[in-house]
Image: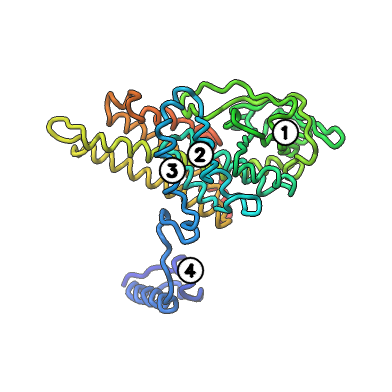
């Protein structure tokens, strides 16, 4: 009679609460099957009210309270879509789109009620970003920066004075920018050269930041500067700097391949005097704050790429249903059907990674690996999706008569900002190494 070893299997089942850990090391196969079935049946009998977990893409009760997708979709269709081509051609975000996002409550959505915000969740942020990206990824970037990089840091680390000054405005009419990257520090983010020298109760900030999203619209900046370069990254500190302060200059906006309506500019700080009250959090802890918000921000990038992919796919399928060649609709050719099914599956898989990482963050479960996976894979999927959609549409896909070429241009940034694809793969591999070292 066949015999199976059951030590590992029974440990796993015991860990799930099915039976005590005292088990035999081996059982005849038939006996082990009967025993396993009995264990499962016993578990079910003792858990009569067990409710199976919902699908990852199904919103739970708390999420449906603030469920923003239908409102965002309507805003995207009515307020954003008519302006997409104009904004892309002019490389300028229309002020009506910006004011509309504030008026509809899409900015600073996690800000608590006491500071004038809706007190919604990080998952709400992800849903909003995804839905906006279906229509225009540039608008999604604008929203994402405010919701995953700017507002959370002030909510988490701001003093009472800082929260009262900034949080209500972040939700109502102020745009913030996150200033970390420099010409000498991209992937090596903490090699930054911007300094903040102590001068009595003030700090004097000197340096330049590069690739700053939303800079052209920003009312204030979260600036990473080093108060003591001799300490390396442990000297990095976060400062709140208002745009109108003397010595602050926003440079010329970049002329980019994609997300052209998203403002990307250098920002220069020439001996900008900032009071110690505008230090965000603790002196020397800016690197920790940056890592934390960038990890969350990567989930936001994943949502951008998923939304972009879905938007491109949705814009392409109707053409394939209408266009005929050799007497058949393009979508009826088996070779096309297999490609379409493949891309649709990739998009859904990327969405599951993004949603899972977002829910892990909300549950206070370590999510760094999952965030890196979500960003990396969703960027791969966006590249695959836009490339395939453009090919499926043939010559017209290569023109501006359809939005596919814009999605194709917009998606490339997903492999670059907030950590390149190679950086994400490094992070994933290092964390896997650590997991296996500790069993």
User: On residue 225, which mark appears?
Assistant: 1
- Mark 3 or 4, nearer chain start: 4
Gap between marks 1 and 2 measured at Cα: 33 Å
Of marks 3 and 4, the one in the foreground: 3
Of marks 1 and 2, the one in the foreground: 2
Work out which residue is located at the far left of the displayed protein and give it: 327
Q: Residue at x 50, y 50 (%)?
A: 124
Quadrant for residue 210, please give it: top right
- Mark 1 or 2, nearer chain start: 2
Scheme of image coloration: rainbow
Residue under label 4, please give it. 16
Q: Position of residue 22 (x, y in %)?
A: 50, 76
Of marks 1 and 4, the one in the foreground: 1
Of marks 2 and 3, the one in the foreground: 2
Gap between marks 2 and 3 measured at Cα: 15 Å
Residue 276 or residue 437, whichever sits in front: 276
Q: Residue at x 74, y 49 (%)?
A: 160
């Amino acid at each position: 009679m066949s015999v199976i070893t059951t030590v590992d299997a029974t440990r796993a089942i015991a860990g799930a609460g099915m039976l005590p850990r005292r088990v035999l090391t081996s059982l005849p196969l038939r006996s082990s099957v009967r025993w396993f079935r009995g264990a499962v049946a016993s578990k079910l009998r003792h858990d009569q009210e067990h409710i199976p977990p919902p699908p990852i893409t199904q919103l739970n009760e708390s999420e449906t309270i603030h469920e923003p997708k239908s409102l965002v979709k309507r805003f995207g269709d009515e307020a954003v879509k008519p302006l997409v081509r104009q904004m892309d051609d002019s490389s300028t975000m229309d002020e009506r789109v910006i004011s509309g996002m504030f008026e509809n409550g899409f900015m600073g959505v996690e800000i608590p009620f006491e500071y004038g915000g809706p007190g919604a969740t990080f998952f709400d942020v992800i849903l909003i970003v995804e839905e906006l990206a279906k229509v225009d990824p540039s608008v999604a970037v604008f929203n994402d920066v405010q919701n995953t990089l700017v507002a959370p840091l002030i909510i988490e680390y701001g003093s009472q004075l800082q929260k009262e000054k900034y949080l209500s405005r972040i939700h109502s009419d102020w745009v913030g920018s996150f200033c970390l990257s420099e010409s000498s520090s991209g992937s090596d983010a903490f090699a930054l050269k911007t300094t903040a020298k102590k001068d009595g109760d003030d700090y004097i900030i000197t340096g330049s930041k590069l690739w700053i999203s939303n800079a052209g619209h920003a009312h204030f900046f979260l600036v990473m500067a080093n108060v003591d370069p001799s300490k390396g990254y442990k000297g990095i500190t976060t400062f709140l700097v208002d745009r109108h302060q003397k010595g602050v200059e926003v440079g010329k906006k970049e002329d980019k391949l994609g997300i052209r309506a998203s403002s990307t500019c250098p920002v220069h700080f020439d001996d900008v005097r900032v009071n110690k009250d505008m230090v965000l959090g603790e002196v020397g802890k800016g690197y920790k704050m940056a890592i934390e918000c960038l990890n969350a921000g990567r989930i936001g990038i994943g949502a951008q790429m998923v939304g972009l992919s879905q938007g491109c796919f949705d814009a392409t399928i109707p053409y394939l249903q209408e266009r005929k060649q050799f007497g058949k609709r393009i979508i009826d050719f088996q070779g096309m059907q297999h490609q379409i099914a493949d891309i649709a599956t990739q998009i859904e898989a990327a969405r599951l990674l993004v949603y899972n990482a977002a829910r892990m963050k909300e549950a206070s479960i370590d999510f760094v690996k999952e965030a890196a996976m979500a960003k990396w894979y969703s960027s791969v999927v966006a590249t695959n999706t836009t490339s395939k959609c453009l090919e499926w549409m043939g010559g017209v896909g290569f023109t501006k008569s359809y939005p596919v070429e814009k999605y194709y241009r917009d998606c490339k940034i997903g492999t670059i900002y907030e950590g390149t694809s190679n950086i994400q793969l490094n992070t994933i591999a290092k964390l896997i190494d650590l997991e296996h070292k500790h069993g």
